[in-house]
Image: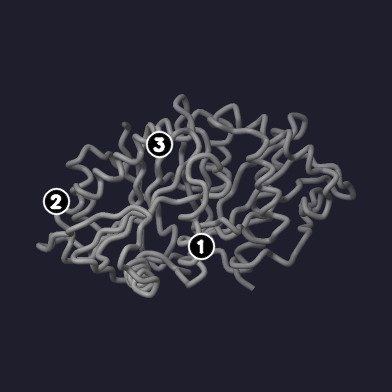
Amino acid sequence: MSLLISPSFNEINLDSLVLRRLKDYPQNCSHFIDCITKAISQDYDEITCAFAENLIRIDQNGFDEYGYFSIGKDIWMICEANSIEPLGYEVITRKRGGCIKIGPTFLNQSARGLGYAKKAIEGLLKEYKNIGARKVYLTAPLNHESTAILDFYRLKFKFEAILSNHYSANSSERICGRFLVNSQLDIPVMPRVHLGQKAITEIFIDDFCNISNEEFYEFLQTNMNKSYNDIDPSFIDGLINSMSRNFETKYEEKGKKVFLATQNSKLEGVSVATLKRGGIFKVAPFLLSDDFITNNNVNRILFEIEKCAIEKDRRKITIFISAIDIAIANILSINNYFCEGILREPYKVGIDMIVYSKFL
């Protein structure tokens, strides 16, 4: 079994607690929607009941039909033994590359401070490790002192980044993670330090022009496989399909803007942007062929990205680049993008990702 499919286990027994799949108890869906919507909307902008409803839809389907790096979501009820009444909920997102993400997490007020969250999370991590998860990470508001103690001290997570004023203009987000299996950090990685010399001639947005699907497939697989795992035909088909979906209004459909950099109709660069809640314009991946990593080429692509972000009334751009792309990182810094952290091997063993952002 792998993270690519929904786990087959529907219950996890933890002595005094039992974790049960919400999809097996649909009578609790309304309670889940109400609890998650109220809890999340306190720290995240643009949250409606559609957020929690979408989590339920993905869980029931077994996979995320609009997913990009996310494969699927599993919603767990935290219950006392011999009860199907939820004390709270835990959401697990299965990601490409072998990671899982924890959250949102919710516990009833009466169930807090009793160690239930730690027990539930540790139980989930053990089971997901058994089906192939190699790392877990979570994001949480920076100002949540109680959850910070849980994350860093009790669950032994390590800090990786702070996303400043990210999902809300008034709240920053911390990212922390923990490896579930021994990381192979000694894998040799060749950094891209030297600048190229060739110039891109045109940049197209959502327009393949003379570029065939075969060329697009080959470029993404060649360039993404250096820093990402699970870049298979389904991933690329999903990306192509996302270009036809509603980019502006429905976050759940995860529409994309794809920036294609070419030289004489030959594809040499691809950047993909997604609208995120809270006014974020997220760009991942940001790819250029070796010979085309120049200040001028990167600046031209950034100009188009920033122009599009402004047109869509975004307040912040966040770009994820592989830590091997030292030359691109330097150019982003020169263009007033600031580093918010380094994510440890999120999509591939041995490859870290750098998070760069800029407020517009």
Tell me the number on the disc at residue 238. 1
Q: Position of residue 100 (x, y in %)?
A: 56, 56
Query: Label 3 sits on what residue type?
Result: Lys
What type is the residue that disc 1 sits on?
Gly
Q: Residue at x 40, y 32 (%)?
A: 313
Residue placed at 27% from the left, 66% from the top?
Answer: 267
Q: Secondary structure at mark 3?
A: loop
Q: Nearer the viewer, residue 238 or 133?
A: 238
Image quadrant in which the C terminus is located: top left
Specify whether 197 is left or right of 57: left
Question: Considering the image in quadrants, where does the N terminus appear?
Answer: bottom right
Whether residue 321 is visible, yes or no, is no
Marked residue nearer the N-terminal end (2 or 1): 1
Residue 289 in which image quadrant: bottom left
First in sequence, mark 3 or 2: give its number: 2
- The answer to which of 234 and 201 lies nearer the viewer is 201
Residue 193, label in figure: none
Is label 1 in a helix, a strand or a loop? helix
N-terminal label among 3 and 1:
1
Query: Around disc 2, counting alpha carbons within 10 Å, would you say few (fewer than 14), some (14 to 19), or many (20 or more)?
Result: some
Which residue is more in the foreground, 225 or 220? Answer: 220
Choose top left, top right, bottom left or bottom right for residue 88.
top right
Labels 2 & 1 near each other (Cβ < 8 A): no
Q: Which one is closest to the eye, mark 3 or mark 2?
A: 3
Give the CA distance from mark 3 to mark 2.
25 Å
User: Looking at the picture, how far across and down is residue 357, in whole percent?
Assistant: 32, 40
**Residue at image coords 18%, 55%:** 327
The Cα atoms of the two marked residues, 2 and 1, are separated by 31 Å
- Residue named by callout 2: 296
Label for residue 312? Answer: 3
Q: What count of labels does the image hold?
A: 3
